[in-house]
Amino acid sequence: MFYPNCFRWFDIGTHKLLDAGGAPYDKLVGARNIAGLPLVDARVSFLGRCR
C-alpha cells in the first residue's frame, strides 16, 4: 500500500461523515465562511501488509 493513500482515505471518510451528519463539506465551508478543515494531528501505524 502506498502510505499517502491513507490520508486520502481519511479525507474521504471525513467528507462521508459530514454528509451523514447532515452538514456536507461544501455547505459547511460556505455557511461558516472558512477556507477548509485543518488536519491538526494524524498518526498511522503500519502493522502489516494489506491484502
Image: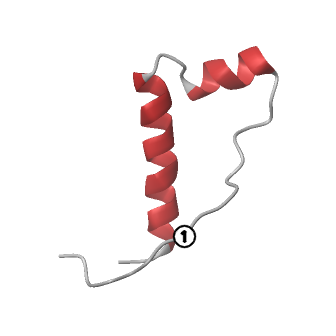
Looking at the picture, the colour scheme in use is: secondary structure
Left or right, 21 with respect to 33, comes to: left
The quadrant the N terminus occupies is bottom left
Q: Is residue 17 above or below residue 20?
A: below
Does residue 17 sit above or below 27 in this rendering? below
| Few, some or many residues within 10 Å of mark 1 (<14, 14–19, 20+) | few
Give, as a three-letter code, the residue at label 1.
Answer: Arg
Q: Residue furthest bottom?
A: 48
Residue at image coords 44%, 33%: 17
Rendering coords of residue 32 (x, y %): 77, 20
Q: Which residue is mark 1?
A: 43
Q: Residue at x 49, y 57 (%)?
A: 8
Residue 21 image point, x, y percent: 45, 21
The quarter of the picture where residue 30 lies is: top right
Task: Give above or below for 20 relative to 39.
Answer: above
> How many marks can you see?
1
| Secondary structure of residue under mark 1 | loop
Residue 37: image location, x then y, percent: 69, 41
Give the percent coordinates (x, y) of residue 46.
39, 81
In the displayed structure, does residue 47 sit left or right of residue 28? left
Which image quarter holds the C terminus?
bottom left
**Residue in view at x 46 percent, y 45 percent:** 12
* Residue 24 lies in quadrant: top right
